[in-house]
Amino acid sequence: MDISNLETFLVVARHGSFSEAGRALGLSRSGVGIRITALEQELGHPLFDRGTRPPKLTRKGRFVLDHAREMLAVWARMKRRETPSEETGLFNLGTVQTVMSGLLPFGLTRFLDRFPQVRLVIRTGLADELDAMVRRGELDAAVQPQSDNIHPGLTWQTICREPLMIAAPEGTAGTTDADLLSAQPFVRYRRIAWGLGRTTEQEFARRGIEVTTLAEVDSIEAALNLVRNGLGVAVVPWRRMHDPFPAGVRCVPFGDPPLSRTLGVLWREDSAGSGLVRGLCEALEDAARAP
């Protein structure tokens, strides 16, 4: 639809004649008639009864008049390039389980305090799965451990680092990570997981550490529950949360030199919600600094 035809229709309805509308618009009477005819052809009905003087609106014309002002108001906003505030609407966030059970809830509380109109939807998965979803635009951002390779078109911001620890049952003999690993069966975190699983395996290979595997789990809580019950030892991050280790568990730094994992936020450089992503980063940084 040509918006100028709809605007001309409103002027004719307001002035009551094609001639008066033409003078108001700087058009000839026939020029006004051409625009009205074109609009009528698009809508499939006559808008004015031309058999009366002055021409009167038809039933269809009155219907169009009722809606034309609203349509033109929307068009005016579009021309001004008004867009909904990015501080409202849906925000799709991905995260790995080990961050969901640690820093993330504290950061999200701060984030939603700042952006109360945002509807947050969280999806968990492995870091490489989340990375692919961010690249496809299925997620606005992902909170996860840093990978060795950030794909072109993606942006990474580091939030914090968490030391990696050997968690062992209270009373297990030994003062070093190697002592504890040799004293008990090993509870593995998923070896394909970025950060924790792969870092652990790489350190074992570098130092020639051999362990007897008890289980391979996909959550820190599951690993710590096995450790707390005296069944084995595990490599876990010292998460930024209250009471990261349950009673009955002791821990020593893992790695020589001690290792840590880097947590951050990954998002697309061309993301329309980049302001929200930066707000998320600030909220997570605040949470990471909090005691």
Image (cartoon, helix red, strand yellow):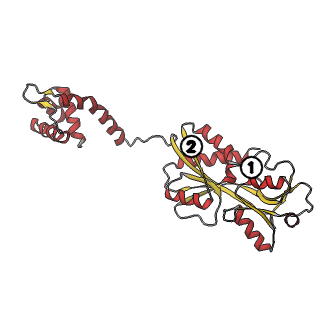
**Residue 181 pos. (x, y %):** 84, 65
> Which is more toward the observer, 151 or 24?
151
CB atoms of marks 1 and 2 within 8 Å: no
Q: Secondary structure at mark 2?
A: strand
> What is the distance, in whole Å, between disc 1 and disc 2 at their CAs?
22 Å
Mark 2 neighbour class, 10 Å CA radius: few under 14, some 14 to 19, many 20 or more: few
**Count of number-bearing discs:** 2
Say whether residue 217 is left or right of residue 12. right
- Quadrant of residue 173 within the rendered picture: bottom right
Q: Residues within 10 Å of mark 1 (few under 14, many from 20)?
A: many
Task: Please tell me in which quadrant of the rendered image residue 62 appears.
Answer: top left
Q: Residue at x 18, y 31 (%)?
A: 24
Q: Which mark is residue 6?
A: none
- Residue pictured at 14% horizontal, 37% vertical: 32
Q: Nearer the viewer's eye, disc 1 or disc 2?
A: 2
Q: Residue at x 16, y 31 (%)?
A: 21
Give the labeled residue for mark 2. 120
User: In the figure, 90 relative to 187: above or below?
Assistant: above
Q: Which residue is mark 1?
A: 240
Q: Earlier in the sequence, mark 1 or mark 2?
A: 2
In this rendered view, identify the residue nearer to me: 193 or 150: 193
Query: Type of residue at label 1?
Result: Arg
Q: Position of residue 231 (x, y in %)?
A: 84, 58
- Residue at 14 percent across and 39 percent down: it is 37
Amino acid type, residue under disc 2 in the picture: Leu
1 relative position to 112: left or right: left
The x, y position of residue 132, in whole percent, is: 54, 60
Q: Is residue 81 left or right of residue 117?
A: left
Rendered-image quadrant of the N terminus: top left
